[in-house]
Image (spheres, rainbow, N blue to C red):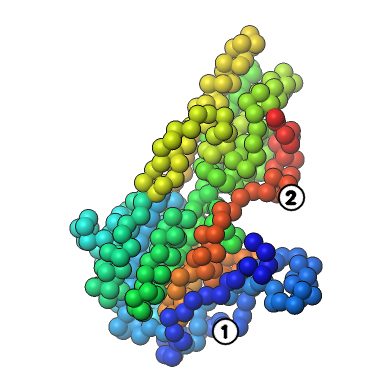
Amino acid sequence: MTNTELDFTIQKLGEGAMPSPMANTQFVKDEQHVAFHRDARDILDCVEAGFDPPQFELAGPREKIYFDPWKLKCGIVTCGGLCPGLNDVIRAIVLGLFYHYGVQTVFGFRYGFEGLSYRYHHVPLELTPEGVKNIHKMGGSILASSRGPQDVSEMVDNLERMNIGILFTIGGDGTLRGGMAIAEEIERRGLKIAVIGVPKTIDNDISYVQASFGFDTAVSEARIAIDSANTEATGARNGIGLVKLMGRESGFIAAWATIASSDVNYCLVPEVPFTLHGFLRSLEERIERRAHAVIVVGEGAGQELMQATGERDASGNVRFNDIGLFLKEKINDHFRGLGVEVNLKYIDPSYTIRSLPANPRDSAFCLLLGHHAVHAGMSGRTNMLVGTWKGEFTHVPLRMATSSRKKINPDGRFWSTVLSSTGQPREML
């Protein structure tokens, strides 16, 4: 998008008129913002072109709030795949509503957006401070989850029937799109219901969001798998350790785990194409020279090398072929054809990582995300998510967050750092 297309204006149900019940806190003023551009030259270019540089609204508690806490009912829903930190965010939202604002009624809608539709008969779970006090120690989501869209009209009917004032949607791209559709239907009906998103994507691929929760835990645990692969590779003659990690369209987990480990010799990500011939030729040279290799591959890498399945999951995502098993077979076949014995060990820790509790850093991050989501909702903001930018918590319109997928730039400095760490060729074509 061009600078003139970057509109981070946040939608409001109305202006806050009630004094916030929060005490001993630092309130944020509506005119406080965070610049989108990191480079001062880009900001100056905007000014010289005659328009204001794009900027995010700063997140945080407001001095005036929109909703009356004593009358307010809230709902929380978790959608998509599991991710470390889901329970931490649920807990943070419930405790933030109760202790910061005095909201007494919070419902958890079970099994994702299914819980908002009457046809599945999922009974909402009433969430209390006592009920959520220890859930952050567990992996998964106490509300469970599901994939796939539901009838937007039915979901809004249910929100209206239950007199819900704020709906917190915790999920990735599909969930955020669903939240945006709900917010648009609410606006069409002229209802006063806020929709606040919390970006949950273990792949860290939400646009205009610096980091999403669960990612730090995923990288940390992925490093353990890489360490095991390296031990196996160096413990055998011509040893090869192959690790497949999450990352359908964005290879951030694979790339950051590679840098964190510094034992990886090949990092294959969806954003950087390679040919089987080019990769195997390079791997052959590596084995001949060093007698071992460690390979990390993101799940969406190399899909063009395999025949497409033509299938989609409940969320509409294309079902990918298993690049890990594909590479395992092709590597073994290649060296067998050369008459060279290799000892390949394949590790796929994906579902182990997804189901873990959050690590301390992620857990703290989840707490802050949940609290800032509550502040945003109580101030009457809607159709937005809470993110981070330049180390600050920000408000991001859902239309912007879902406008594109955040990906690694193959020509950027970050990918150059990965290449410097692995020593792999920039191109394997």
Q: Which residue type carries mark 1?
A: Lys
Q: Nearer the viewer, residue 218 or 380?
A: 380
Read off the residue under disc 1: 29
Quadrant, the C terminus: top right
Mark earlier in primary sequence (1, 2): 1
Q: Nearer the viewer, residue 322 or 65?
A: 322
Q: Contact (CB < 8 A) between labels 1 and 2? A: no
Residue 282, visible in the rendered structure = yes
Residue 399 in picture, x, y percent from top left: 51, 65
Looking at the image, which residue is at 58% across and 65% down? Answer: 388
Real-space CA distance between mark 1 and mark 2, rounded to the nearest whole angstrom: 35 Å
Quadrant, the N terminus: bottom right
Q: Secondary structure at mark 1?
A: loop
Q: Which residue type carries mark 2?
A: Arg
Looking at the image, which residue is at 79% across and 67% down? Answer: 41
Looking at the image, which residue is at 41% across and 37% down? Answer: 311
Residue 98, visible in the rendered structure = no
Residue 5 in picture, x, y percent from top left: 63, 67
Query: Up-down: is 163 above or below 332?
Result: below
Looking at the image, which residue is at 57% across and 84% down? Answer: 29
Left/right placement of residue 204 relative to residue 55 reads left
Residue 96 in picture, x, y percent from top left: 41, 73
Left/right placement of residue 266 relative to residue 344 reads right
Crowding at mark 2 (Cα within 10 Å: few <14, some 14-19, many 20+): few
Quarter of image, res 417: top right
Residue 307 in picture, x, y percent from top left: 50, 29
Crowding at mark 1 (Cα within 10 Å: few <14, some 14-19, many 20+): some
Q: Determine which of the numbered discs, if any, sits on residue 413 in the image.
A: 2
Query: Up-down: is 325 above or below 15?
Result: above
Q: Secondary structure at mark 2?
A: helix
